[in-house]
Image (cartoon, helix red, strand yellow):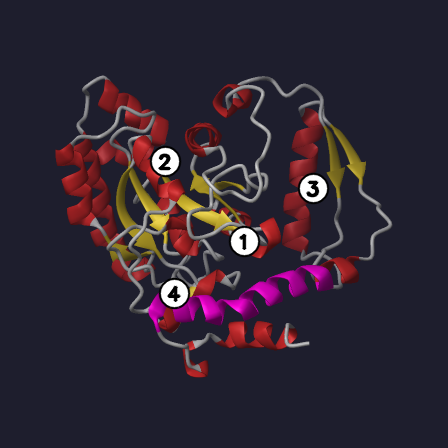
Amino acid sequence: MEEYEQYDALGLAALVRTGEVCPEALLEAAIARIEAHNPLLNAVVTPMFDQARAAIRAGLPSGPFQGVPFVLKDLALAAVPGIPTRQGAVLFEDFVPRYEAEIVTRYRRAGLVVVGKTATPELGLAPTTESRLYGVTRNPWDVGRSPGGSSGGSAVAVAAGYVPMANASDGGGSIRIPAAWCGLFGLKPTRARTPAGPAHGIGWAGLECVHALTRSVRDSAALLDATQGADVGAPFVAPPPVRPYLEEAQRPPGCLRIALRTAPLTFHGPLHLDCRRALDDVVDLCAELGHIIDNWHYDINWEQVRDATRLVVATEVRSRPAVVGVLLTRWPTPSALPDGRRDIQRRAGR
C-alpha cells in the first residue's frame, strides 16, 4: 500500500469503514516498513506480528480506529499478557506480565491493531533512548542523532512511517521531548485523564501520564476520547470533559493569552541561537493568528522546584526494588540496575 504514509490514523480508519482497504492490507504495510527500516532505526524491540494477524482474524471492534496499526511503549504502563515487558532494562529481561494494562484494553476496544512494542531507555528514566539491553535508537531524520526519550521508540515508529500514531507516556518530558525532536504532535494529558491501572496508580506522585505521539492533532484528540476516564481503583479522577476532544480540536480557539518564557528551566545560560530563532518564529506565528503573547515573569525559586521534583522521582524509584522482587520472585542485584537509577537511588537515600 504505497499511499499508507499519506494518511493519519483517522484517515486510515475511514478507508477501512468504506471498504477501500482492509485491515490486513494496513497491517502488512506496517510490517513491511518495520522490516525495512527497523534494523537501522531500532524502534520496535518486540514484534507482535502474529498476534496482530490473529486479532484481525478474530474480528476487530468497530471503534474509531478500526484496523489501524499501533505500537506500545515497552513499559509496564502498557503491559500485554504473555508478551515480555522488559522496559529497556536487564533487570526486567525475563518479566512477562499476566495482566493487560487498562489503557491497552481501551486501545483494542477502539479497533487498534497492536503490531509491536517500542524501545525505551532503562526504566524510562532518560531523555534519550538507549539501553544496555537494546542499544541505541536512531532519529529517522538524522540517524546520527537521538529521537529523544523516554518515548523515543514510539516517536521513531511514527516519524519513520511504521504507524500513524503510537502509545507513549510522560513524567518529565517523555512525550514532549521526542515530539519536538522527531517533528510530531505530542500531548501530555492532565493527571488522571487516562488510566494507569491495574499495576500502576500514582506514577511519580501523579506526574506520570499515558497518551500518545501522533502525526495529526485530530488523531491525538480522538484517541484521548477513546481512552480517557478513570479505571477501577484509580487514586485520582479527572473531571469529565465538557465536550469530545475531537470536537474541541475543530473549534476556533478565539484569542488566547500565551505566556512566553525564554530562560531555560533546567540549566543556567542562554538558549542556543537555533532554539531562540525557532521560538521567535512560533511567537510571530501566534501573534499573526491574533493571540496575545505575554512575557512570563513569576517569582518562583526554580532550584527548589527542581529539587522537589527530583526528590519525588528519586523516592519512588528507590522503592521499586521491593516491587521488582515480588514481580520476578527474586531480589535485583546492583549490577542489574541502570547507572542512572543507582544515582537516583542515592539521591533518595537521605
- Asked if residue 325 lies left or right of residue 260, the reply is left
The alpha-carbon separation of the residues under discs 2 and 3 comes to 39 Å
In three-dimensional space, the C-alpha distance between marks 4 and 3, rounded to whole angstroms, equals 37 Å
Residue, disc 3:
280
Q: Residue at x 77, y 62 (%)?
A: 303
Per the image, the residue denoted by label 4 is 88
**Image side of residue 249 versus residue 70, left or right:** right
Q: Is residue 203 visible?
A: yes
Q: Earlier in the sequence, mark 4 or mark 2?
A: 4
Identify the amino acid type marked 1: Gly
Residue at figure coordinates x 39%, y 60% from the top left: 138
Any mark on residue 256, and which? none
Going from the N terminus, do you reach mark 2 or mark 3 first? 2
Give the x, y percent position of residue 98.
29, 54
Q: Which residue is mark 1?
A: 203
Q: Could you tell which of marks 1 and 4 lies nearer the N-terminus?
A: 4
Q: Residues within 10 Å of mark 4 (few under 14, many from 20)?
A: many
Is the residue 250 above or below the residue 38 in the image? Answer: above
Q: CA distance from mark 1 to mark 4?
A: 18 Å
- 338 sits to left or right of 93: right
Tell how many labels.
4
